Amino acid sequence: MAVAIRAFAPGAVASHYRDSVWVEPTEWLALATALRDRREFTFDLLNSISAVDYIGYFEVVYHLTSLRQNRSAVVKVKCGEGRKDPIVPSVVSVWRTADLQEREAYDLMGIRFEGHPNLKRIMLWEGFPGHPLRKDFVTYDQSVVPLEAQQAVAERKAQDGA
Amino acid sequence: MTLQTEPISINFGPQHPSTHGVFRMRVTFDGELIVDVEPVFGYLHRGSEKLAEERTYTQVVTLTDRMDYVASMTNNQAYILSVEKLAGIVPEPRGVWLRMIAAELQRIASHLVATGFLIQDLGALGTPLMYAMREREKILDLFEMMCGARITNSYLRPGGVFADAPDYFWQALRQFMDDIPGQVDEMEELLGSSEIILQRTKSVAVLKPGDMVNAGITGPMLRAGGVDWDLRHRNSYDYYDRVQFDRPLHHASDNFARYWVRIQEMRESIKIVEQCIKAIEPGPVRPKSVPFLVRPPKGDSYVGIECPKGELGFYLVSDGGVSPYRCHVRAPSLMNLTLLKEMLVGTYMADMFVSFGSTDINMGEVDR
């Protein structure tokens, strides 16, 4: 897969491991169109868009399927190095199914999809503070425990560990 | 004199009885004609994906039940297959056959609900729905014998299922399998030969097959458009490559085609269950070597299965711990709503909920 992409877009592939291919965010939109239209790929179905928070950076994972060739591929795009302003080009113009999924990733993970026609929150209401699927999001359960109690638990854990 | 009309916006839901849950649509009408639709989601958002990050791999099974709550068994199946791929667990044959029986029974139950509520949306209040629900009730009784629960089953575990089905289950299943083909025939005869239903559903809300693929619509909706795509056949998870079944296709891609495909798929599911009953052999239902706390190695896995509504996929990321680092659900109900606007614009107000019902969505899965 990575070899086949490098054949026509040399700068697009950042790295690859097993069946996953990491793609440069700047090249992604052009590559997505090629993956859909070129005869050797024909990935006409975009199964799923998942966003993962790896603390140091974010990763958007695209699962693609070709109905004609009955094969699938995984494309990953790294973004937001150092947790700052993760931006990925939107692929709504290539696959319509990205519409709702990108809104979901924006709502819950805070990834901005550039060029999305209607990038609004989908599950939560406008004005909700933060993006809940990020690892640094404090949940309600965590927030209602008083700070002193949290510190006491942390101290006890530190003592147990020592 | 020509009448001047002005577009009017009406808010449907979230508490509308025909929205199959808590779904809201802002619809703009010109007279009775729909000119614009804007779906609003999120009234049933429970943060399942976040909750999954704090639970062990086995505990997450209970969360998957509550996503699509009319098809819990297939939700379990998709999640368990993803965990098995991630952790490299080889399931026991008897466990796999049992979960295939459970999944196909669940498909029949889900399609019965879809068909029953579609007729209810057409205005036949009560009676046809009760016919469908009566049959579904028998399936829920079978589930109760299998695992003690009727709706939120949590029956599957990594490596198989958590308990073997008792002897009286097999007798009851035999009884059910003898009854159900006749009941499906009766239902098709009652509904498919009704002039009113045919007039109301044929050539309404037609979608193009190419658009549907591009918009990620899968399952019976896609097959109603003539696209031969069924993951049980193409991807062949579990032992679906060892059973014979047809893939019913319709080419009209309208509301009637979607209803028709579901009725035919119930027949195929009955065939599959019959073959599973023949093939199943005594043995353990899950391997002894799988611990309660599954610790998959670092990595990620995605498995998509053919659930009654379309492709249900679980994307799991493991950091080597006892709970998933990230659990993303590819919900077919949400994807199938991508073309809602294209489907509804140009049809009439009375057809709105019929078209909406024919997509067969479940809000628990849309919002998660």
Image: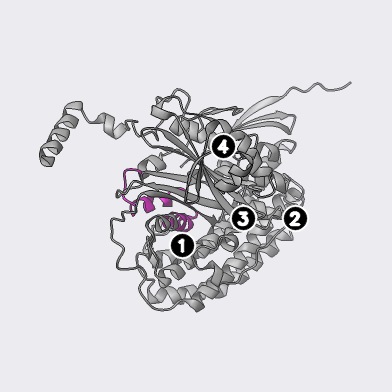
Magenta segment includes B62: yes
Residue kind at label 2, given as amino acid type: His
Distance from disc 3 to disc 1, alpha carbons, whole Å, reads 17 Å
Residue that carries the numbered disc 2 in the rendered image = B251
Q: In screen coordinates, is B120 left or right of B296?
A: right
Per the image, label 3 sits on a secondary structure element best described as: helix
Q: Which residues fall within the magenta stretch?
A: B53-80
Residue A53, position as x, y percentages in the image: 40, 36
State which chain disc 4 sits on: A
Residue A135, position as x, y percentages in the image: 35, 34
The N terminus of chain B lies in which quarter of the figure? top right
Specify whether disc 2 shares its chain with disc 1.
Answer: yes
Per the image, label 1 sits on a secondary structure element best described as: helix
Residue that carries the numbered disc 3 in the rendered image = B115
Could you tell me if residue B361 is visible in this image? no
Residue kind at label 4, given as amino acid type: Ala
Residue that carries the numbered disc 4 in the rendered image = A12
* Residue at image point 43% right, 78% down: B281
State which chain disc 2 sits on: B
Residue B263, position as x, y percentages in the image: 64, 61
Distance from disc 4 to disc 3, alpha carbons, whole Å, reads 47 Å
Residue A57, position as x, y percentages in the image: 40, 33
Per the image, label 2 sits on a secondary structure element best described as: loop
Whether the residues at callouts 2 and 1 have beta carbons within 8 Å, the answer is no
Q: Nearer the viewer, mark 3 or mark 2?
A: 2
State which chain disc 1 sits on: B
Circle number at residue B140: 1
| Precedes in sequence: disc 3 or disc 2 | 3
* Residue at image point 49% right, 68% down: B101
Distance from disc 4 to disc 1, alpha carbons, whole Å, reads 51 Å
